[in-house]
Amino acid sequence: MKIFADLHIHSRYSKGTSKKITLKNLEDSVLKKGIGLLGTGDFTHPRWLKELSNLKEEKGLLKTNDEFYFVLQTEVNLVFNKGGKLRKIHLLLLSPSLNCSKRIASFFSLYCNIEADGRPTINLDAERFVKEMKKIDEAMEIIPAHIWTPWFGLFGSKSGFDSIEECFGSMTEYIHALETGLSSDPEMNWKISALDRYELVSFSDAHSYWPHRLGREATLFDLEEKSYDSLIKAIKEKKVVLTLEVDPAYGKYHFDGHRKCNFSCSYERTKELDGICPICHRPLTIGVLNRVEELSDRDNGKPEHSHPFVKSLPLAEIIAFHKGKGVMTKSVIDDYEFLIRNLGNEYNILLFEDIKKIESIAGKGIAQLIQAQRSDRLMIKPGYDGEYGKIIKD
């Protein structure tokens, strides 16, 4: 059973998220995308957990009345000192049951106010944290989130580590997968041979239910059945069919730079500048591409059991670029809904549908942009220091 999954999202109870995120809105959006399995986000938040508890629990997943399936999932922010440095690491947690989720929430409440933020901050060393989670339930899966982002990634330039072992110590064996994040793709991660043994997964980290955020990155799994155990088995046994990736340049931290100074540059230019912004003369925010190059130990080294990936920007972004309007404007949303009604879900349009049929429904301009994207000819101005990348031409 091949199924697209987006297992990293947030609820309306996380800071900086849409207050219109409801289970119904999420379900409506992912059906338009083509996603068959969605993370719940924020399962430790009491009010969100109460809503989730109204769903039917089946084989470790939550099922709606319309028979759409959710995976109990949350993100946690670990803040701790290690190696003489303050670390801030985001981890993705997958839970096998509501009971387990409630026990995790109870544990978190010992360290923070779990009602304050859907993404709780816990002052625990990563190694000890994994130990405590495994005490609660061995079936829990822990995945380092967006591993390259500067401030909260496992390998981030601001507070990260140089190896997984340095972060997790004796509990490294319980880490089976890594989330590449918007600013990197599998090919970039293949440059670090130490990552070969981990499955590389991609999810959206969506803070909204809108289709240009939800499912912008996803993972196609080959599952024996629609169940939590089958999902975790697929992760551990590297049964990912492919990952859907936005172009890494689209991510908010691909290049180095300073957003306030409106300055960005490649890692080669950063070296020439000795890491100093030429405008404000302060240290640049070092992005993902630079950090990957710093830790890389080979130029080309596709692992034997690696999965393929496809680069694709969200359909709404393509429509917005074509129309020269904002992605949330009414005309862009109307055009998006029209294409979904006439061509099927978004993944079908972006990846599989015949271009001539797309042109007959969407027009030549949209069809050409989708074809350019499929051929890796869509040009992106790289994002940096919290600024998303932008399509510049095809």
Image: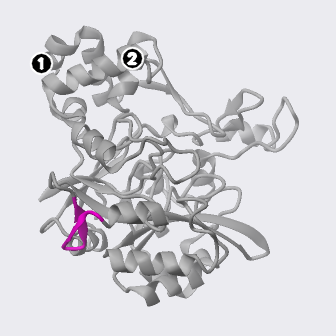
Crowdedness of circle 2 by 10 Å Cα count: few (<14), some, many (20+)? few
Return the x and y of residue 309 as percentages of the image width and height: 31, 47
Q: Nearer the viewer, residue 37 or 274?
A: 37
Q: Residue at 41% across / 65% down in the picture? A: 49
Which amino acid does the dot numbered 2 rest on? Answer: Lys
Return the x and y of residue 365 as percentages of the image width and height: 30, 10
Q: Is residue 69 magenta?
A: no
Return the x and y of residue 248 as percentages of the image width and height: 47, 40
Q: Nearer the viewer, residue 106 or 317?
A: 106
Quarter of the figure that contains the C terminus:
top left
Q: Nearer the viewer, residue 269 or 25?
A: 25
**Label of residue 44 in the image:** none
Quarter of the figure that contains the N terminus:
bottom left
| Region in magenta | 54-63
Residue 140 visible in the picture? no
Return the x and y of residue 250 as percentages of the image width and height: 49, 35
Outermost right residue: 281
Q: Is residue 56 magenta?
A: yes
Tag 1 residue = 357
Q: Residue at 15% across / 51% down in the picture? A: 66
**Residue 108 against residue 195 in the figure, above or below:** below
**N-terminal label among 2 and 1:** 2
Which amino acid does the dot numbered 1 rest on? Answer: Lys
Question: Would you say the magenta stretch is mainly helix, strand or loop?
Answer: strand
Tag 2 residue = 330
**In-image side of 11 versus 28 (left or right):** right
Q: Secondary structure at mark 2?
A: helix
Q: Residue at 31% across / 76% down in the picture? A: 97
Q: Secondary structure at mark 1?
A: helix
**In-image side of 179 versus 96 (left or right):** right
Q: Quadrant of residue 102?
A: bottom left
